[in-house]
Image: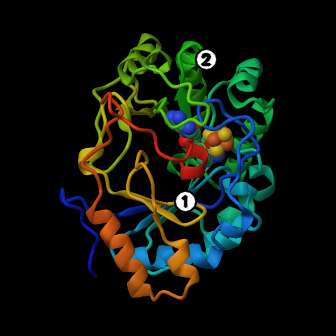
Amino acid sequence: MNAWVDNFGRTARKLRISVTDRCNLRCVYCMPEHPVWMPKKEILTFEELTRIASIAARHGVDRLRVTGGEPLLRKDLSVFINMLKGIAGIREIALTTNGLLLPQQARALYAAGLDRVTVSVDSLHRERVLKLARRDVRDGVLAGIEAARAAGFEGERLKINVVVMRGRNEEEVGDITAWAREQNLHLRFIEFMPLEGDKIWSRSLLVPAEEIISRVKERFPLNVGVRKPGETAETYSFIDGKGSIGVIASVTQAFCGDCDRVRITADGGFRTCLFAASGTDLRGPLRSGVSDEGLAEYMKMAVSRKNRGHLVSDPAFQRPDLAMNAIGG
Ligand code: SAM
Ligand code: SF4
């Protein structure tokens, strides 16, 4: 097995698979109200995506995350999870979702072998959710979390993502933490990254990890944070032993040095960084009969060209050609 290693010695171990750019929400930090969707005929089939994942698994990738857009909008997603489950060498399959469709799908996903679910919850207040997601979905998201639990996603198998934005939900960091502790849920706070379709990002809308942590500490004392190599979140356990929170400081404390992630967009763009300006097209070669070895070579070459790190804090930073929903968060 020839692992894909970049010029800075980092090995690709995790593949994020975006199955669609479409979504039933319009989170302001992610996509515009009126997006231009990828043409349906350009979206890779489950067979095409499984083929890419299998090749990646033969070259050292052992963890998959299915995302989007909203992955549960893709018909029969559990069938796809089951296809991925059959790939030799894959140790874990996770899903990131806004949770709205979990009541209908959580059981099938569990039965298909999905290992972990992450649900995005940015506020517990109806009005705030409406402003952030531009849809009135607070209750639907919470029902999704309940459905995930009822289906068997409990403890380490269920996580909550919270994007923190200045003036939108930073006041709620303490309350969301209190709720998660009561519910025995592991939270991960995420810094707002400049990947949104509306191009509203500015430093003034970013709530730095340091501030998020001090807001949590005002209510719940924390031990010193620890970040395991390859993990995006720094984890802080509560001093009283009642669980932990994670903080993903993608902007203020970038963790590019040990990044082991690569991604495939729903239309077959292979990306070695969330902030990469563009992707390597695999759809063209896939649909013109390329061999597995040929596809592997495209991915290997892309990994070898992976940048040392993102340049968000550099004045010369240029946004990727796609918004977050189309890259796959
Ligand atoms: N629709 C699903 C969801 O919302 O969980 C999966 C796709 S979404 C793009 C994946 C994750 O990226 C979510 O947790 C979302 O909150 C996060 N996200 C989206 N845009 C972001 C941004 N500009 N900065 C930081 N996180 C972002
Ligand atoms: Fe949809 Fe997720 Fe983006 Fe919100 S963050 S608009 S739920 S893809």
* Above or below: residue 153 compared with residue 33: below
Image coordinates for residue 71, horizontal then vertical, percent: 67, 56
Q: Report whether residue 187 is seen.
A: no
Amino acid at pointer 2: Arg
Q: Which residue is depicted at the point 51% across and 47% down?
A: 321
Q: How many marks?
A: 2
* Above or below: residue 203 compared with residue 49: above
Q: Is residue 309 left or right of residue 87?
A: left
Q: Which residue is depicted at the point 31% across and 70% down?
A: 301
Name the image quarter holding the N terminus. bottom left
Few, some or many residues within 10 Å of mark 1 (<14, 14–19, 20+): many
Q: Which residue is depicted at the point 44% across and 72% down?
A: 90
Q: Report whether residue 281 is seen.
A: yes
Q: Nearer the viewer, residue 90 or 276?
A: 276
* Above or below: residue 55 compared with residue 148: below
Q: Secondary structure at mark 1?
A: loop
Image coordinates for residue 60, horizontal then vertical, percent: 33, 72
Amino acid at pointer 1: Thr
- Which residue does the numbered mark 1 point to in the structure image? 265
For ligand 2, the image quadrant comes to: top right
Q: Nearer the viewer, residue 172 or 115?
A: 172
Q: Secondary structure at mark 2?
A: loop
Q: Earlier in the sequence, mark 1 or mark 2?
A: 2
Q: Quadrant of residue 252?
A: top left
Image coordinates for residue 95, horizontal then vertical, percent: 58, 55
Nearer to us of marks 1 and 2 is: 1
Q: Quadrant of residue 236?
A: top left
* Above or below: residue 328 compared with residue 43: above
- Which residue does the numbered mark 2 point to in the structure image? 168
